[in-house]
Image (cartoon, coloured by chain):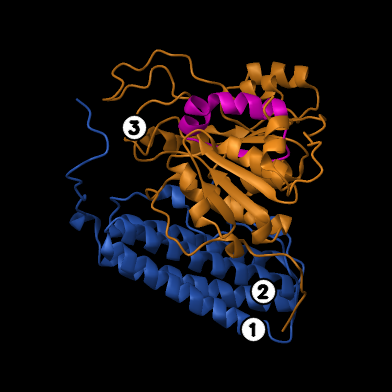
Chain colours: A blue, B orange
Amino acid sequence: MTAGVTSKVIGSAGELLAHAYQMELEAQERYGYLADQMEMHNNADLAKLFRELARVEGIHAGDILEQMQGMQVPQINPLDYKWSGSESPEALDMGDMHYMMTPRQALLLALKAEQNAFEFFDHLLKSTDDEDTRRFAAEFAEEEQEHVELVLKELKKHPESDERTREDMDPPIQQE
Amino acid sequence: MNIQQSPNFKASDYKSGLTPVWCPGCGDFHVLLSVTKALAELGTPPENVAVISGIGCSSRIPAYTNCYGFHGVHGRSLALGAGLKVARPDLTVMVMSGDGDGFSIGGNHFLHACRRNVDMTYIVMDNRVYGMTKGQPSPTTEPDWDSALSPGGTGLSPFHPLVIALASGANFVAREFSGDIKGSTRTIVEAVRHPGFSFVEILSPCVTFRPDERQWKTQTHAASVEATDDPARAARRIMTDDGFNVGVLYRGRRKPYETHVSDLAGDPAILEEEFAV
């Protein structure tokens, strides 16, 4: 199942902040897992890339936590977040990973996750009349767009023409 | 800041610091996420949960949780789990297995765990292959799955876990897809809360030896019928199942097994005598 890209009804700025904070925490955690996986499978370049993405998401989560100061922010249980999909929009699908994946393939997955996050906030911005909610949604959409541009900039360093498929000298399936 | 406080836990409270060695893309990563989210939703403290497993890729999961755990003997996870639950009924016991561990060497334990109806949850991560030992066909592998280790396929009818569970008396029967983390989480929560033996098969792709299973993301679909408490109706539904229906199939009303031994902290031999039926 893919992450949801549209927000269902979010009723207040506090609820939006709770969702945004959770989204960044999950993205940070997910990129961290992917970095761990790549380290485990000796793919150092990708481990470094995912670790950097996790760091950026962590900074963003910290910023949102500061914005929560003085706000009424609800505590939300794991099944009660209003993602339209199975997971938060910015959580990269771990099922799309492969131990032989290239930096370009990894960046394309990250791009999709960041675009999903942008669309989540952009959709909310266009569908709510609450002024505070709109203000935060606009700010977060802009930040996610910056992340999209960051990934696009990285992608330029790994053009399709330079793509080299990694070779496994001892592949798991040896068909006769 | 005024976050409205809740006594509940976060999913991360149930994770250990160990890095899983599963292959990137493995569905078992998703199952680990679903289990920890379910425990957070249930709000059970980690020290009141025991995660028991057998042998195989999926059975590594106790080490990746922060709960009590036992990485047991091949195929014997249910025996361990049942013994623990009877001796310590206050614990939430979750038994985790794979299709090889659970349905081949552990197949007989599966039948009798369903029959005994001890109050615990059995989650089987089914990838239809022995991944840890490099890709042999398992009891749930399709008969025509052609590989270097099974040229032309085994030709054997696959084991149908939900049919067997229902026929053997499991009190809660469900199937989920690992990639649907929310759906799996919801079903695991319900399985733990349901009294008696709850069985959840989670289709969990092995992307290394069964790359074709990446398609499960699009092949799985919500079952078109509601869960039932009538085993006959559930049986009729499962006989027309395409293998990719997900959701709860059966919620039974059988009374869970209860021991007649009052002093559970006493001589374990007394408990063993009663249980060996």
Which residue range is magenta in the image? B99-126
B25 displayed left or right of A29:
left
B236 displayed left or right of A174:
right
Callout 1: helix, strand or loop?
Answer: helix
What's the residue type where badge 1 is placed?
A: Gln
| Distance (Cα) linking label 2 and label 1 | 8 Å
The residue singled out by tag 2 in the image is A17
Q: Residue at x 65, y 44 (%)?
A: B84
Callout 3: helix, strand or loop?
Answer: loop
Residue A1 placement (x, y as % from top left):
54, 45
Residue B109 on the magenta segment: yes
2 or 3: mark nearer the eye: 3
Q: Is residue A53 above or below residue B67?
A: below
Q: Residues within 10 Å of mark 3 (few under 14, many from 20)?
A: many
* Camera-nearest residue between B132 and B77: B77
Q: Which mark is residue A67?
A: 1
Write down the chain letter for disc 1: A
Same chain assignment for discs 2 and 3 = no
Quarter of the rendering containing residue A77: bottom right
CB atoms at circles 2 and 1 under 8 Å apart? yes
Callout 2: helix, strand or loop?
Answer: helix
Residue A25 placement (x, y as % from top left):
55, 69
Marks 2 and 1, the one that precedes in the sequence: 2
Q: Is residue B6 above or below residue B194?
A: below
Q: Residue at x 42, y 55 (%)?
A: B20
B217 displayed left or right of B82:
left
